[in-house]
Image (cartoon, helix red, strand yellow):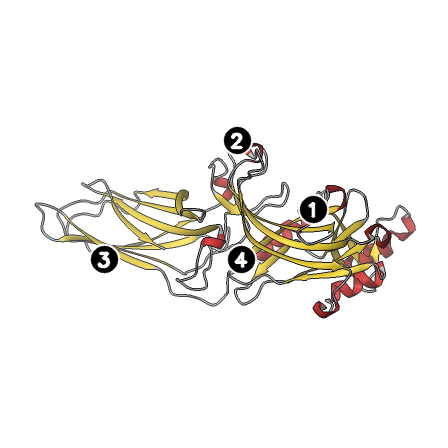
């Protein structure tokens, strides 16, 4: 089940207005950053400039000596490539002296509460890290400036220096948050990304909070639009002291679904037994594989349907067919602790976690943190407790 990334990114832009830790500004086509104006006569011009501008996230270190500018905080894995992480850092050269400015991107899996971190031990595992020197710039590592970087440098001047990161597609983890319980406090468990810019003598050197900027970012997966094979499965059940068998076949109308989209399950039954089928049960379960020191799998129901419409299916009745619809939504599952969700930024709303799309079956899951899949289960109530079928 893959979310509509466009809708998710639009929600992120709305929530960013309430984010006090990173301040969004507007840059017009001339590279000018437009700050809010209290002059009523400038409102019309400002509104026109904002419509033409680009949202920029800005955050300064506590001492104000370095400031990071970032064009967006959601970066999409298109399976062939990942949106580049590009921006600039505004540096106060008088403060640097012999020190340097570095930027790094870190993806980490937090699997324990922050208040349990004691004696230098943390309940987190680093899954991906990339680092580069921003100031002074290294000419041999220079890349062509992106349009956003050109506009920001034109506005901010020669003390603005670019940074650029490219995450490997399908090999770096997606942002996933495990839904906390009602009594849980602190940062929730899950896989999160952080862009950090800091002042230090070396890349691994000690950095101080007063000269460090941290920005939470997200990596999401885009579901390709090309259709795949329709998932289908069938099973049969034989009964003691009864001739014939009960055959159940189920199929989905397509392979991929977006959030808020209904799943259509086509159920076909051939009852060649003397038993009577009374009702059908359909459920959608999220399966999250936690890839840490030893793999563990957690299952959680996200949608359920029980129906007696069209029943019973009597003995020797064949060709019975019906289509059912279920719609998994986070709104109906907010009370389920440990449910995997798309990564969250601050207190904005999110969705059920996207399915993890692996490059191939042999790909290692160790550096992915949390691998998410969804499964549809169809079962019948008959003389026996129920009959099950799994269709991925």
Q: Earlier in the sequence, mark 2 or mark 3?
A: 2
**Residue underneath mark 1:** 206
* Residue 273 at least partly seen: yes
Q: Residues within 10 Å of mark 1 (few under 14, many from 20)?
A: few
Foreground tag (3 vs 4): 4
For the residues labelled 2 and 3, say whether their Cβ atoms are less than 8 Å apart: no
**Relative to 289, 322 lies left or right:** left
**Residue underneath mark 2:** 182
x and y, in percent, of residue 392 in the image: 36, 55
> Of helix, strand and loop, which one carries label 1?
loop
Q: CA distance from mark 3 to mark 4?
A: 47 Å
Q: Nearer the viewer, residue 117 or 32?
A: 117
**Residue underneath mark 4:** 172
Q: CA distance from mark 1 to mark 2?
A: 37 Å
> Of helix, strand and loop, which one carries label 2?
loop
Q: Which label sits on residue 319? A: 3
Indicate whether 323 appears above or below 137: above
**Residue visible at 46% across and 53% down in the picture:** 366
């Amino acid at each position: 089940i893959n979310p509509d990334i466009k809708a998710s990114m639009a929600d992120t832009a709305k929530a960013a207005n309430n984010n006090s830790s990173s301040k969004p500004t507007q840059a017009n086509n001339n590279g000018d950053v437009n700050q809010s104006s209290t002059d009523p006569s400038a409102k019309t011009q400002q509104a026109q400039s904002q419509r033409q501008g680009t949202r920029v996230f800005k955050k300064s270190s506590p001492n104000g000596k370095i400031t990071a500018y970032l064009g967006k905080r959601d970066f999409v894995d298109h399976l062939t490539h990942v949106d580049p992480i590009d921006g600039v850092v505004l540096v106060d050269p008088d403060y640097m002296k012999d020190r340097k400015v570095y930027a790094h991107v870190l993806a980490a899996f937090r699997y324990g509460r922050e208040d349990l971190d004691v004696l230098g031990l943390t309940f987190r595992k680093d899954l991906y890290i990339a680092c580069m020197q921003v100031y002074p710039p290294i000419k041999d590592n220079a890349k062509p400036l992106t349009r956003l970087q050109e506009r920001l440098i034109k506005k901010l001047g020669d003390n603005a220096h670019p940074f650029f990161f490219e995450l490997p597609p399908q090999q770096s983890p997606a942002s996933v948050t495990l839904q906390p319980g009602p009594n849980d406090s602190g940062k929730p468990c899950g896989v999160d990304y952080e862009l950090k810019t800091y002042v230090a003598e070396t890349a691994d050197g000690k950095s101080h909070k007063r000269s460090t900027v941290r920005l939470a970012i997200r990596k999401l997966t885009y579901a390709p639009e090309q259709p795949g094979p329709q998932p289908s499965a069938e099973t049969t059940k034989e009964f003691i002291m009864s001739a014939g068998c009960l055959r159940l076949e189920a199929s989905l109308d397509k392979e991929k679904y977006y959030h808020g989209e209904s799943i259509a399950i086509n159920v076909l039954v051939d009852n060649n037994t003397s038993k009577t089928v009374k009702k059908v049960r359909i459920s959608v379960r999220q399966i999250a594989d936690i890839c840490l020191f030893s793999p563990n799998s957690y299952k959680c129901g996200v949608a359920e349907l029980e129906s007696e419409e069209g029943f019973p299916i009597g003995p020797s009745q064949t060709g019975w067919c019906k289509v059912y619809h279920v719609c998994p939504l986070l709104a109906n599952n907010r009370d389920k602790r440990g449910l995997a969700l798309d990564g969250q930024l601050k207190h904005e709303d999110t969705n059920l976690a996207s399915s993890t799309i692996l490059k191939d079956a042999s790909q290692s899951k160790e550096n992915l943190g949390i691998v998410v899949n969804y499964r549809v289960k169809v079962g019948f109530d008959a003389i026996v407790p129920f009959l099950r079928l799994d269709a991925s």
